[in-house]
Amino acid sequence: MTETLPAFTPPTGFAVPGRIPVSDPAASVWQTATLTGIRRETPNASTFRFAVPAWSGHLPGQHLALRLTASDGYTAQRHYSIASAPDDSGYIELTLDHVAGGEVSGWFHTVAEPGDEVEVRGPLSGFFAWPGDRPALLIGAGSGVVPLMSMLRHRRARGLSVPLRLLVSARSPEELIYADEYGAETTPVFTRSAPEGTAVGRLAAGHLARLVAESPTGGWEAYVCGSNGFAEHASRLLVAAGQPVERIRVERFG
């Protein structure tokens, strides 16, 4: 049986006045970031830790621009979500997939080593940020979980009691980024292989209906992050489950 869902048109962006800074003069300045450590997350993804002494801070869910410059002067620039929780340590972390043919991700996964320097600019965007002041329903797939993990880490680091739930989709347990960090707030969905006794399949209405129906006082602010196809699919499921469209924030990769 084919399930028919209503068309979904995500909002173009909004921010909560007085709560989410959408611009910061310091974010327009390129600054040097020194790679200090590399941590393998899955066979295809690693976390890269940088020292950025002049970093002005960020909110969970924000991203940055990163620039590599080759010895011949050629430059390549990409935008990456920030994985680490906001703090004043002077360090930030990015988790990158090794994209086939990707010149920047390829360099990070095959050439980069501690001591290397890159340039970063940010933080950027206030639309997808979660300052920790409202119940959050987080839905991500693959590396789309990166900005959502910043939110989860922020909640834990600050000891916040505001409700938060995370649904994360991966092809298999081996490809579940941050697998060791999830707790009772997280529901994994596996699309190709799963542990014995766990259903295999795409994110479906049943995964979201209960959470939306049992939303806390004031309702959820939903954050969806992943590929274009996943973001569209998850957003339509949310709307079908009763989540107000104006309370769905979407960040698409690709």
Image (cartoon, helix red, strand yellow):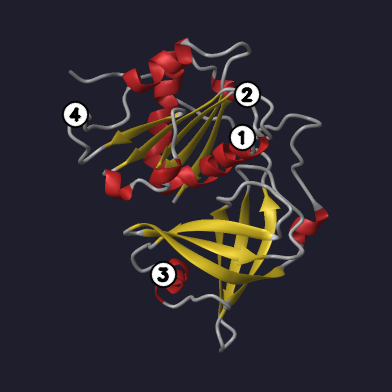
Q: Quadrant of residue 170?
A: top left
Expressed as whole percent of the image width and height from the top left, the position of residue 144 reads 45, 44
Is 197 above or below relative to 154? above
Q: Image point 21% across, 20% down: which residue? A: 2
Q: Nearer the viewer, residue 129 or 254?
A: 129
What amino acid does circle 3 point to?
A: His
Q: Which residue is mark 1?
A: 155
Give whichever of discs 1 and 3 has the lower sequence position.
3
Expressed as whole percent of the image width and height from the top left, the position of residue 111 reads 44, 78
Give whichever of discs 4 and 3 has the lower sequence position.
3
Badge 2: few (under 14), some or many (20 or more) residues near its Cα, within 10 Å?
Answer: few
**CA–CA distance in space, label 4 to label 3:** 34 Å
User: Which of the numbered marks, if any, corresponds to residue 162?
Assistant: 2
208 relative to 129 in the view: left or right = left
User: Which of the numbered marks, if any, corresponds to residue 252?
Assistant: none
**CA–CA distance in space, label 4 to label 2:** 31 Å
Mark 3 secondary-structure assignment: helix
